[in-house]
Amino acid sequence: MKSKACLFFLLPVLILIIVFVVYPILGTIGLSFLSPEGKFVGFQNYVNVLTSDETINLKRFPFKHPPWGTLIHNAVWITIHLPLSLVLGLFFAVVLKGVKGSSVIKSLIFLGMVTPMVVGGWLVRFMFDKNLGIVNLFLRLAGLTYLADKTWTMWPQLALLATILGAVWMWTGFSMVIYSAALATIPKEYYEAADIDGASTFQKFFYITLPLLKPATIVIVVMSILEELKIFDLVFVATMGGPGSASNVLALQMYLKAFKYFEANEAAAIAVILALLTIFPALYVVKSMVGKQ
Amino acid sequence: MNVKTKKFIYNACLTIITWSLGILWTAPFIGILMISVRPMEEIMHGWWNLEHISFTISNFLDAWSGRGGSYPLYIGVKNSILIASLSTIVPLIVSALAAYAFARLSFPLRNLLFLTITLLMGIPAQIIAIPLFKLMNNLRLVNTYLGLVLVHSAWGAPWIILFLRNYFMSLPKEIEEAAKVDGASDVQVFSQIVLPLAKPALLSVIALQFTWVWNDFFFALLLIMTPSNYVATQCLAFLKGKYHVPWGLIGAGTIITMAVPVALYFALQRYYIRGMIGWVVKG
């Protein structure tokens, strides 16, 4: 009777997950070790992918402009996107804490998190457009006409940066919301005690606020790395990885290889590499959420 | 100047600066709204030029009905509503059942199974793409609503299970135990006691899952090829002009596609944020 009840609760979801998630994962892993003719080739597909200029191009990186290869592009994504979204999110969370109507501003900033990434892709093109772009407008006002007179998403030098900055703009709401929630849990008494001891605003920030925000920071870091590795829609719409793969990323490279060039085996190898990269942050999330219960 | 005035001025400055920053932050959205409601000649040299302002809804009408080279969004929106609703209800039901089992029942391999399922939460969709397409093709489910709904349900299940399991575990056990003493079965306890108590968590799941499915592009790209079955994000992504970028159409399409998740966000804001914070911070 007991085991029957368990089956009733678990079976539907297990069938769904096994058929539509687990089986395809195993299938992809299998494909990545086969040749197009179906022969076992060991790690050959991985070697092909990782030695290809499409994935890692050390002839160009770092002294010439992109394309640098998708794996390096994803690394650049993390290097630029992660610190910027942490700093901006923290900035907004701290500054908005005591401001009138801050919940309205927060909602507006959070709008990017609610918006489809396909829209994000168009907005990146729009923001960095030479005629219509707000970024280009400010660059022009600052006298940087060289940068302002180009549509960034069509310019190999800056297409990658444009997509990354666009995503920073879209996702700052996430770190802001997490930091705001964490700030609200810091007891007022800490600051009052610091006031009595004559601590300055900066001292309070660096010795009280920042250390207590460490758990929130770790969560944002991990979640952001996951999203930065998996970025797809935004790049698909904004640049399609171009011009000349100057803004291509692993997820898009995999899709194009599999469904445009029909090289399923190498595409599968890319998918496995991407999944392995996400495993470590994912493991952390799972560990922290499954938690102490 | 006394301390009070100083503080007042400081606060006023801070308010003005942060409000300006907040508005500047939303400038791209304001811009996209501008290009969608103003004729092209007016915005050609910047949507921020406000000397001549006239309004038109023709972009919205064109984007909606598919004139001017776009895929008709009324079809995309209809498909998206259908798919996102089903892809919210189905995984919610099956995952809630599983979450209850993981929270309250004991069975062999429970922890291992739970860990495996939650590990699936972070993986990229690309890792299932090729075999999934082949499978769907063999099942004749390519280009169907059912195919996409099944995939979204399976894909969303892990995080819903984790989120609801954590919530169920935070509920007081005593009520459930009392009901069991009175002879209620596990199914009765689940449906009549646990589910009603979990309403806030269920609303969080609905808000987040619906939004994620609505916003999805990759699975739709993979499984839907017929334009009449396109979801809204596909219609928008494939929008193209003949000679130049049709910004007016794109602006209108963007706003139409955004409108549903944004409306849902404002309607369920509390649950939305709580769900988001809950599933990342709790533990």
Image (cartoon, rainbow, N blue to C red):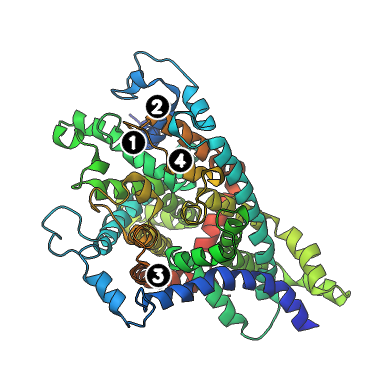
Circles 1 and 3 in contact, beta carbons < 8 Å: no
Q: Amino acid at mark 1?
A: Phe
Q: Could you tell me if the residues under marks 4 and 2 are in contact, i.e. CB atoms within 8 Å?
A: no
What label does residue A275 carry, if any?
Answer: 3
Q: Residues within 10 Å of mark 2 (few under 14, many from 20)?
A: many
Which residue in the structure is indicated by mark 2?
B35
Using a 10 Å C-alpha cutoff, classify the residue at mark 4 as few (fewer than 14 neighbours), some (14 to 19) or many (20 or more). Answer: many
Q: CA distance from mark 1 to mark 2?
A: 10 Å
Question: How far apart in space, not on screen, are marks 4 and 2 (Cα)?
Answer: 16 Å
Report the residue marked by disc 4.
B236
Residue B82's mark? none
Q: Chain of mark 1?
A: A
Residue A25's x, y, as percent?
47, 72
Mark 4 against mark 2, which lies toward the viewer? Answer: 4
**Residues at badges 3 and 4 in contact (C-beta under 8 Å)?**
no
Rendered residue at 38%/52% (across/down): A195
Residue B7 appears in the rendering: no
Pointer 3 and pointer 2 on the same chain: no
Q: Residue at x 71, y 72 (%)?
A: A9
Residue at mark 3: chain? A
Q: Nearer the viewer, residue A66 or B107?
A: A66
* Proximity of marks 1 and 2: CB atoms separated by less than 8 Å: yes
- Residue A231: percent from the left, percent from the top? 38, 56
Instruction: Say what secondary structure mark 3 lies in.
Output: helix
